[in-house]
Image (cartoon, coloured by chain):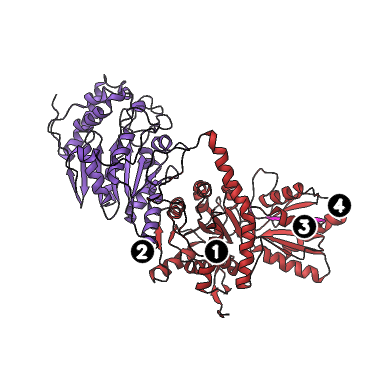
Amino acid sequence: MPFKSINDIIVKQDFFSPGHGLCAGCGAAQIARIVMKVVGKDSIIINSTGCLEVSTTTYPWTAWKVPYIHVAFENAAAVASGIRSAYDALIMKKKLNKDVNVVVLAGDGGTADIGLQALSGAFERGDRITYICYDNEAYMNTGIQRSGATPYGAWTTTSPSGQRTFKKDLMGIAIAHRVKYAATASIAYLLDAANKVEKAISMNGPSFIHWLQPCTIGWRFDPKLTVKLSRLAVKTGLWPLYEYYDGAVKLTVQVPKRAPVLEYLKLQGRFRHIINNKNELVKIQSYADELAAKFGLGPVSE
Amino acid sequence: MQIIEPLTLSGNLAIAYAVKQLDVDVVAAYPITPQTTMVEKISEYISKGELKANLLLVESEHSAISACLSAAASGARVFTSSSSQGLLLMHEILFITSALRFPVVMAIANRAVSAPINIWNDHGDIMPQRDTGWIQLFVESAQEAYDKVIQAYRIAEDDKVRLPIMINIDGIVLSHTYEPVYPISDSDVASFSPWNLYSPRLDPDNPITIGAFCYPDYYFETRYQSLKALNDSLPIISNVDKEFGELSGRSYGIVSPFKCDDADIILISMGSISMTVRAAVKKLREKGEKVGMLSLKLFRPFPSKELIRYIKNAKAIGIIDRAFSPGAVAGPVFTEVTSALYLSKMDIPSVDFFLGLGGRDVKMEDIKDIFNILKRIVKTGLIERHSYYIGLRG
């Protein structure tokens, strides 16, 4: 049953506890909390190495009220496939009787870069796992180094004069594997996101969610702006909310009047060096316009 | 007693046959010569319904070992196999598998490492895995490979052990050579190495966090626990071998000495080459020479005490190394053996013999040459060199 209101989600039991060490305003904590409310008790969480892992499992404490496993950086999808395979085999052989949701939470480095090979394997084999990428657009855990998901123009410690290439198209890669379900998500659109997670775990095959995660430290913004930035990413067309299912791509949140990208960029320190650079702004605006045309968003309204 | 006819199997097929009898739940693997026929046979068993298991055909060895680790963490009995570059690609996850204490069983068809690329046998792939925290067994025949796979699950899944195990078979030499193999019955396998749903594991009714982040205040103790488990596994490995002997009539020991009791000269070896060494010792004994040999069946944990018991009266010891440890004091097996001697306060002249790299044939004559070098040391009391490269040209 799809969620009808935010309240339907909020009342659900928490399986991600407070008291973890993530930053104030961290989008990953909000993603983890919502995912856990939706997937519930009978789930196994696989986490690749990253902020979420180091901040929620500091021995002898844990923020996870469900079985949780972290093995390494690049193999979250393979670890998930192993669990899926084990549960399927044990149920087939009547050694176990209760199935589980197998859910990965991995950052953009662990997904778009070092973990892409393992992820491609799991997608190609059709393994029944849900892979959620929380994308903060750089290697934040190691100190803000650029990743394949860093957006054009963004400052990081290893792209000090601004990233020279555009983000890797993870959704395009997932869809090219003919996964059962793929969707983008935003913490500013919780109902949309929660329903996507619910759909993803119900699939009889691989599902993928690409979730934009504002990072206060790496993006350089005031912690109170996390949700606002998430919303602006959608409103500018830089983060269209859509889903892929059964061969078709469908926009799930329409933006009739788009905000100019400058509205989004100017709130973030990582773009400070380009907000007065017209050429750079035009490039980023054109990129947003391209996405808007592709997914059917409305025009920019000043 | 039920009489079972021998099967004609290669080392790889003998292992596959054991895996079938052990009713493994998940097999994850990636092809690499000379391991391939093992997984091909298992695939055939699964497709014919003779083995009820999930075959996870992953995109790399890194994913194969990752999936085995997590499948074992879910309670399944798992198997994988690899060789050479594939094993090197697994390297990172091997440490994690042992530290998280999951009973993964892996067969390795030992093969030389690149460069230059070479598909033949030596121990260049396994020696870099020495410090990964796995139990490491070496065998001399397809029969022994079969027997050890059955024992491996019993050992690995023992609550007091809970460690992963590597069974090393020499690539091509054992992996592809057919021999008569006497299996034990399916029911004997099931009662010798029974599967149980163990805890703790990834179970929603008893949630635990696996693979947590450790600050300096807990890391040392956590690593020490894995170290202790590996060291403590030695008597269990030895006992399982003995018990298997009572069941099947075949017991190998964790070290296998031959004519060591009164030997002046002892040559120590691992893997299939031990058969050549044993044959050479037989011939030399016929001539009245007081030589012996010892085959190391267990490399991790290293059986120092058991080894010393058999070699302590020798006047010279030769150690065969089939891999380099570049820049080290000596080869990996030599270093272990001489450390064991030192800790037992024994100063026996010891020489390292490197041979058989990249599948280079080792002949009986080569072994006799080694014994001649050692004989000279006993006679003269002089060690000219601590390492020899047998058959090296140029």
The residues bearing labels 1 and 3 have C-alpha atoms spaced at a distance of 28 Å
**Residue for point 79% across, 47% down:** B345
The residues bearing labels 2 and 3 have C-alpha atoms spaced at a distance of 52 Å
Q: Are marks 2 and 1 in contact (CB under 8 Å)?
A: no
Are both tags, 3 and 4, on one chain? yes
* Secondary structure mostly seen in the magenta stretch: strand
Picture disc at residue A92:
2
Q: Are marks 3 and 4 in contact (CB under 8 Å)?
A: no
Q: Which of pointers 2 and 3 indicates the residue nearer the eye?
A: 2
Q: Is residue A291 visible?
A: yes
Q: Chain of mark 2?
A: A
The residues bearing labels 2 and 1 have C-alpha atoms spaced at a distance of 24 Å
At label 3, which amino acid type do we have?
Ile
Within the magenta stretch, is there residue B321?
A: yes
Q: Residues within 10 Å of mark 2 (few under 14, many from 20)?
A: some
Q: Residues within 10 Å of mark 1 (few under 14, many from 20)?
A: many
The span shown in magenta is: B315-324
Write down the residue under mark 4: B381
Q: Which of pointers 4 and 1 indicates the residue nearer the eye?
A: 1
Q: Earlier in the sequence, mark 4 or mark 1?
A: 1
**Residue for point 60% across, 51% down:** B230
Are both tags, 4 and 1, on one chain? yes
At label 2, which amino acid type do we have?
Met
